[in-house]
Image: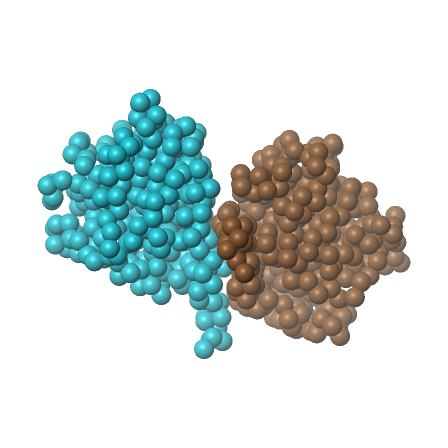
Chain colours: A cyan, B brown
Amino acid sequence: MREGSRSASGYNGPVVTFEDIRQAHARIRDRIRRTPVEHSRSFDERAGLHCYFKCENLQRGGAFKIRGATNFILQLDAGQLRRGVVAYSSGNHAQAVALAAREAGTQATLVMPADAPRSKLEATRARGARIVTYDRQRESREAIGEAIARETGATLVPPFDHPWIIAGQGTAAVELLEDVPELDALIAPLGGGGLLSGCAIAAKALRPQIRVFGAEPERASDWYLSLAQGRRVRISPPDTIADGLRAPQPGELTFSLLREHLEAVLLVSEEEILETMSFLLMRLKLLVEPSGAVAAAAALFRKLPPELRSVGVILSGGNVDFDVIRMLPDTDRRQDGKMD
Amino acid sequence: MREGSRSASGYNGPVVTFEDIRQAHARIRDRIRRTPVEHSRSFDERAGLHCYFKCENLQRGGAFKIRGATNFILQLDAGQLRRGVVAYSSGNHAQAVALAAREAGTQATLVMPADAPRSKLEATRARGARIVTYDRQRESREAIGEAIARETGATLVPPFDHPWIIAGQGTAAVELLEDVPELDALIAPLGGGGLLSGCAIAAKALRPQIRVFGAEPERASDWYLSLAQGRRVRISPPDTIADGLRAPQPGELTFSLLREHLEAVLLVSEEEILETMSFLLMRLKLLVEPSGAVAAAAALFRKLPPELRSVGVILSGGNVDFDVIRMLPDTDRRQDGKMD
């Protein structure tokens, strides 16, 4: 099933099973929040189906990433913990690693893009991590992260393409299906694919007939292209407001898992993402980051098959800069025609 | 205990007991949402105590008001329901009455200030209610509401000063204390006083040692002045961003109830309200309206007695206009000194 000769994280081990996800859940459940599942009649009316939102924007660290990072770091041995951990991330993974590292008593070094949302840089620093910034257009975060790992003996905590990370992220779907067992479908945003890989495995194990969809910005359509071509397509660094979905290529492991489970990848425009954020904010009173709203946007703008009755939608994170909030369209005003 | 010769709602009946609140809860619980209780380490750190937020911003209609309105309308007889209901409100009560009326199959007429947040006007209209606007500076909403009731035979649903309304609002505290039984204190915003009256009665019944506080804007300090003077003080129409707390005078019944239960009224500035909204939005990912953030502002800015360990804070609503969101301070930026 593998498309490349090696994965970015250097991982070449076994695939991920539902048992791995159940063990991950037992391992991390006291260190994460069991996030609520929200529901909105007005959203359903516009989407034309019942949507159940798994609110990982209310998760510790503001995103689902704490699940995988905690599951990973809790499996390191004492010597590894002494030498610390290193991670590269557009933000939420960095915060999660910083948080999980601090709780495990180990030092984290984070490689973050210089243009990451400032709120994410600050939040990571506030959690006691060392930050190394890089230029997203010219430098390779993987190379910088691996160099730091080599020089310091720190363990690299990969952002998505590792079975421990994937198993951790899959715990979100375990909780969602415990709360809402009879879902027709599940949809989550696709960045590196760690979240949806884990969630797809969990969902299919718990409810074999469930249909699994991914969502990504039109401007970051590497998964859409990769699925269509049957190989991992690399695109140039994506320019999308969904900063958490800017990985230019599916992971090796995540791609091999998701080609098996994924029915389709749905694309949304930048405008649809912002309008969905605005709807979630004004109607559900929830702040969701652009990446976190991508799956909801696919539902709101009716890109899912029309025969679906109920879908679990993962709101993957809520870490937003104020600049983005100020840019949101005033959807209420638009709807009644009072906006220009 | 009565200070005036008649109350605005014409009510002159018995006081409200905990039994009334329990019956209200049984009556309305299937028609309202049991809102979650949220908690935030970063908020607690700044506030210097444990805060448990009862999220009535996530309530149906976006505020606690549906509790009282539903409890009221469900007690009308068939003849009353045929003639409809009328209410005057700065917004959230209007939405609640519109919603509860529609569900009870009766027509609602709402008297709303012309300068109420547009989102509230629109949401009320969308629920099938007739809207009559008035000038907050020059006209009396009570007079308009009572005239409509006289002319049409509709029943006036008072915004706060009625035992059915107060009993309904008190159900929020019943749920909060079921979820977090060991609170030292309870704090809620004070507008007309319906929410806090009901909540104080419920909280004192369930936990006699609980201390009860109210919060209001410095610019709308009618409760503060009234408690200090031992009589219901009327102030000129308050100019505060907390549009839900602009009632110029405590209610007759609410004042008689709260002088018994209320330890102190804490005042917050307009800036403190906005900064608290910003904190709740950016850290807890929750959209709370200005009125809804007033009690949280009193906690965040350490106006509560320092010996308190844990406090239940009612976030009373989440209906905000976009203009207000755009006005919020970027607290993260301010904290690290990068703002002008």
Quarter of the view holding residue B43: top right
Q: Which residue corresponds to the image point at 67% horizontal and 70% vertical from the top-left?
A: B113
Q: Residue furthest front?
A: A151
Which is nearer the eye, A272 or A325?
A325
From the top left corner, tell me how far across and down residue B149 is, in percent: 73, 68
Q: Is residue B218 above or below residue A164?
A: below
Q: Quadrant of the C terminus of chain B?
A: bottom right
Which is nearer the eye, B317 or B69?
B317
Q: Is residue B326 left or right of residue A14?
A: right
Q: Which residue corresponds to the image point at 75% horizontal and 74% vertical from the top-left?
A: B138
From the top left corner, tell me how far across and down residue B93 is, in percent: 64, 59
From the top left corner, tell me how far across and down residue B233 is, in percent: 84, 58
Q: Is residue B14 above or below residue A34?
A: below
Q: Is residue A321 visible?
A: yes
Q: Which residue corresponds to the image point at 69% horizontal and 35% vertical from the top-left?
A: B308
Which is nearer the eye, B6 or A290?
A290
Q: Is residue B119 above or below residue A111?
A: below
From the top left corner, tell me how far across and down residue A273 is, in percent: 36, 60
All told, the count of numbered labels is 0
Q: Is residue B81 visible?
A: no
Q: Is residue B36 above or below residue B97?
A: above
Q: Which residue corresponds to the image point at 64% horizontal and 40% vertical from the top-left?
A: B312
Q: Residue furthest bottom?
A: A340
Which is nearer the eye, A266 or B296?
B296
Q: Is residue A296 left or right of residue A137?
A: right
Q: Is residue B26 left or right of residue A285?
A: right
